[in-house]
Amino acid sequence: MVRNPPQPEALAEESKIPGIPNARFWGDEPPQHLLAQLERPSEELKARYPALAGVQHNYLAISGGGANGAFGAGFLSGWTDTGTRPEFTFVTGISTGALTAPLAFLGPDWDPLLEEIFTRYSTKDLIRKRTPFAALTADALVSTEGLKAIIDRIFDERMLSAIASEWLTKGRPLLIGTTNLYALRPVLWRIQHIAASGEPSALALVRNVLLASASLPIAFPPVRIEVEAAGRRYDEMHIDGGAVSQVFLYPPELSWDLFLKKLNVPSKPNVYLIRNSRLKPHWNATKPRVLPIALQTLTSLIRTQGIGDMFRVYLSSQRDGMNFHMVNIPDSFDFRPKEQFDQDYMRKLFDVGRQLGRSKNPWYREPPGFSTHTSA
């Protein structure tokens, strides 16, 4: 495969996706397209987003968690069973949540694919270990050809068309997070905008974004994405969005309350956060070797980073006058996986999530430790 030269730092701010210039934005600063819209009169904004004006808003944010994504998939399925699952105004996903988010965005009719992704495949279906020499000289410890094949089969033209329709008719966004490995900054991809672009490369780009977001650093290879700047083509390298954030809603610097006022949203929006992780860490008698120690340390960093991201979403939602709801893997679930993607483990976790999704009181209204578990 022919590769382009790496994107130069001096061109980072002007690099665009060929044919889809507004495909993404930096996730650590307010997006310019939304800032510009906030300057518009209220009536003009309502005309731009007619399906979002004067109605209740419901936002869904799905975290990372690797194989633990089975929990969120099961929870959404159980929530569907109650008949109370809303149509989400917008959905965000990162890492394993990136694979869940498009299906959650499209609604309950797509639940069977959620169950397939997180219960029918095991490690051998998703990744292939490289030889010790290759692992030392290549860009990752494993190959993700299996995962890519599954993404390419499930995330097809029909799904792309359905996402585009939701954007064009209702103005509903779907955001997926990756990490730009060169800049070490979060990138938020406007999947709905890509889907509606009409570009022949749109489907391949969405698939690459999903694969990149789910690509655990070091273990999984980064994904190269072609960009254009100053009349030339370059490559960016993107990895797991969880390298910079485990869950996100919108940049905290954004005045979302002003957006709500201009759209005349009649009541407090609901923020729903699905955290594909336990709050308490698992004990693991790690082998005294470099790789096991590194992976265990990375696990710790991801878990504690996720707690900080949870509080960031909570504080933003409270500042902007929203109702916060959060659910996570119960600490009582103590089944241990035997491999990275243990099918039996994911099946059990999916069932735990589905059972919790069917319950009357699954939500924390504040981050655990802030107060008691109260009814939604």
Image (tube, helix red, strand yellow):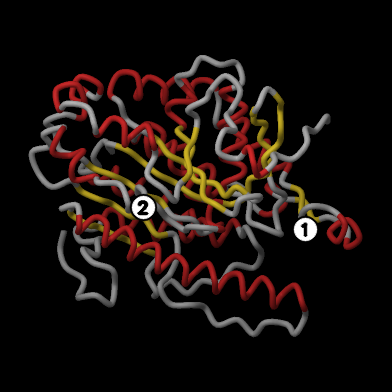
Which is closer to the viewer, label 1 or label 2? 1
Q: Where residue 359 sits in the image (x, y, percent)?
A: 24, 58
Q: Residue at x 54, y 71 (%)?
A: 301
Quarter holding the C terminus is bottom left
Marks 1 and 2, the one that precedes in the sequence: 2
How much space separates mark 1 and mark 2, taking CA atoms? 31 Å
> Circle 1 — which element?
loop
Q: What amino acid is at disc 2? A: Phe
Q: Position of residue 36 (x, y in %)?
A: 31, 31
Can you see residue 67?
Answer: no
- For the question of whether residue 224 can be seen, the reply is yes
Whether residue 84 sits left or right of residue 335 in the image: it is left
State the residue in front, 312 or 72. 312
Residue 310 lies, in percent from the top left, at 36, 63
Point out which mark residue 141 bears.
1
* Front residue (pair 33, 67): 33
Q: Amino acid at mark 1?
A: Leu
Residue 317: which quarter of the image? bottom left
User: Can you say whether 289 is above or below 185 in the image?
Assistant: below
Which quadrant: the N terminus?
top right
